[in-house]
Amino acid sequence: MLTVVLRAWLTGESPGDRSRPDPPRPGIGHQPAGPPDAPRAPARGGAGQEAGGGTAGQACLRYRGGAAGGEDSGGEGNGVLGRSSMDNVTCIEDLRAMALRRVPRAFFQYADHGSYTQSTLRANRAGLDAVRFRQRVGIDVGTRQLSTIIAGEPASLPLVLAPVGLCGMLFGDGEILACRAAQAAGIPFCLSTMSICSIEDVAAAVREPFWFQLYLMRDRGFVRDLLGRVVAARCSALVITLDLNVLGQRHCDIKNGMSVPPRITLANLANVTARPAWALSILRGRRKTFGNLAGHIPGGDNLRSVAQWTAAQFDPTLNWADIEWIRALWPGRIILKGILDPEDAKIAARMGVSAIVVSNHGGRQLDGAPSAISALPAVADAVGSDIEIMFDSGIRSGQDVLRALALGARSCMIGRAYLYGLGAGGLQGVAKAIEIIRNELDVSMALTGITSAAAAGPQIIAAGSGIEAPRRPS
């Protein structure tokens, strides 16, 4: 099995399925199946219902049980892992511990670690942990409302599953399983340009529109073609990542062979051999390389060729004029991700986009940048009355979501938190991650004396937290 897995990873071939044609990729001129801003189904659920290299800062016991095996918990369409473990999971850190055991080191550390010294990655967690709540009593909190509107779409709680590259290498068909879990929970899912499953794979496997994240590559013909596919798939929002025009170095990726081209090391061989359940889930998956690039790159069925092409495509000339170029091609909502400075936030707000995401790429880009939570209040002061603000980078709990809401965000994105669930147990693990954050948010709202997520503001933050709250409501 080991030889088959490694060949599949490097060549992109699935055993017994090497003749599967690539999906059609209509251009901008093709008529989409429906308007890109078609409404989502009503949000489901109610009040009950991105890196670490270390703990998530939560005081919970790590779950040590649950062996791999069985056919049920991996999620519809790709069940591999046993389902005896999720009932004992109490926090995101439990899911991280399980994923650490079940996912090969190279892929786990790709998701879990940050760039260079990882100082910004650590700052993200430290900054969130430093924000303290005011505990309030004697307030009727018997009825609580977590639902909200995110970029014009109803959501059962202020949460989005963020775009993550190589998601499908933590668990086979990972993007499809994560999207299904998000839609079942009534929250948005955003597919990455660098996903394993293609836009068409995900669109064919889920019932509702999802978001798509775009990297503006040097090859603008590819970008134009990709946007045509996004329109055809009826994606409901376009998230443009601004903070990856130059790739920050992640030391662990180089050491683990996640380089250009990828390297197979003896350590990687041994690590994969020890995780047969993971290998089986990957073999059962639809694809083994970047699905959205298939058919566009010469030699694109080989991961080495894809990696070399991709490394040369990140565009350091990316500027605000490029957003206007995209607007001419994309008729739907635009969300700009990677805003950390108030001046950049003001420029984005003047462009008339639907929302911005305050983010430092989860500590995976500029090492030494401030924590995202410390940057949030100044951005909220600068543009909170003009544009919707979302928050990303470091969220590991419902308490973290509440902190970001109190400091100026309307909603939050999670990356690593749901990836840990995906690696731990496929669809069931992602659903568990969402459930954990939902329940933690619900309880924390009650204990701070508020009854709706929209009511969260500076009034629930304790004095001495070390972060100045926004001076005006967002």
Image: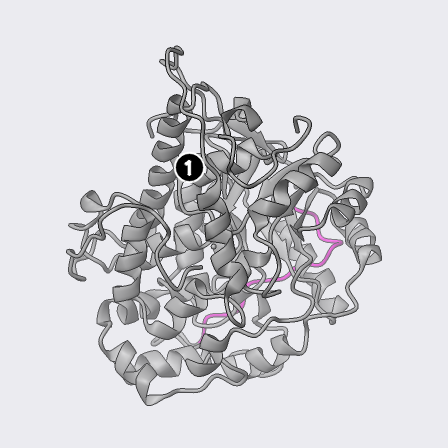
Where residue 112 sits in the image (x, y, percent)? 42, 63
Along the viewing direction, whichever of 278 and 350 lies nearer the viewer: 350
Q: Is residue 260 left or right of residue 132?
A: right
Amino acid type, mark 1: Gln
- Secondary element type, mark 1: helix
Counting labels gives 1
Q: In this view, does 144 lie to the left or right of 298?
A: left
Using the rendered view, name the quadrant where residue 77 is placed.
bottom left
The span shown in magenta is 19-33
Along the viewing direction, whichever of 438 and 408 lies nearer the viewer: 408
Where residue 228 sits in the image (x, y, percent)? 69, 56
Q: Is residue 164 magenta?
A: no
Q: Residue 92, relative to residue 156: is it above or below?
A: below
Where residue 407 sits in the image (x, y, percent)? 58, 35
- Residue at left offset 65%, top offset 64%: 244
Q: Can residue 104 be seen in this view?
A: yes
Along the viewing direction, whichever of 214 and 30 lies nearer the viewer: 214
Q: How is the image coloured?
A: one colour
Q: In this view, does 30 lie to the left or right of 456?
A: right
Q: Name the chief secondary structure element in magenta.
A: loop
Using the rendered view, name the quadrant where residue 40 is placed.
top right
- Residue at left offset 51%, top offset 79%: 301
Along the viewing direction, whichever of 30 and 112 lies nearer the viewer: 112
Q: Residue 151, relative to residue 118: is it above or below?
A: above
Q: Residue 439, relative to residue 395: is it above or below?
A: above
